[in-house]
Amino acid sequence: MADVHSKEVRSFNMSRIKGKDTKPEMIVRKFLHSNGFRYGLYSKYLPGKPDIVLKKYKTIVDVRGCFWHGHKNCKFGDLVKIESAGIADRIKSAIDRDKIKSEKWKRMGWQFIIVWDSCELETKRRTSLKREHVLMRLMNKLKKIDTSN
């Protein structure tokens, strides 16, 4: 299917999509802060400038979009049929970049937790039981890391 916009209009539209302070990130950040966790954002000292960095726990929370990061077995991720080769290449590139970042974080001694936006946080819903479970699981993982140190 052909794009309904010209290349210039599509480029302009895509340039307006936020990469930082997204709704899924804000949900996770508000939850962590309200539960007493203090964190840094987009640390330039770590590969890929991760979304949320908890230095005390030496842990990174990476909030990823299901579609753009090709979340496996997810109706918002890899189960979506993509007709555009450009978009498919961009998704593959993001997946490859994520693997490289994850390996670097491991080598540097950092733990990381991935939170998926569409299927785990259900950002389209005002409230979500699944979101609450995911955030509680995140908090429990962080507390477990704290007690093991």
Image: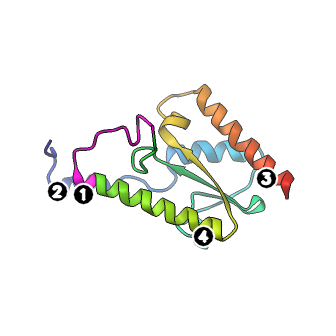
Q: Position of residue 99 (x, y in %)?
A: 50, 61
The residue type indicated by label 4 comes to Leu
Q: Residue at x 85, y 54 (%)?
A: 148
Residue 11, numbered label: 1
Residue 34 appears anywhere in the view: no
The residue type indicated by label 1 comes to Ser
Q: Quadrant of residue 35?
A: top right
Structural distance between the alpha carbons of marks 4 and 3? 20 Å
Structural distance between the alpha carbons of marks 1 and 2? 6 Å
State the residue position of label 2: 7
Name which of mark 4 and mark 1 comes first in the sequence.
1
Q: Is residue 76 above or below residue 5?
A: above
Name which of mark 1 and mark 3 comes first in the sequence.
1
Q: Confirm or deny contact between disc 1 and disc 3 (CB under 8 A).
A: no
Q: Confirm or deny contact between disc 4 and disc 1 (CB under 8 A).
A: no
State the residue position of label 4: 46
State the residue position of label 3: 145
The residue type indicated by label 2 comes to Lys
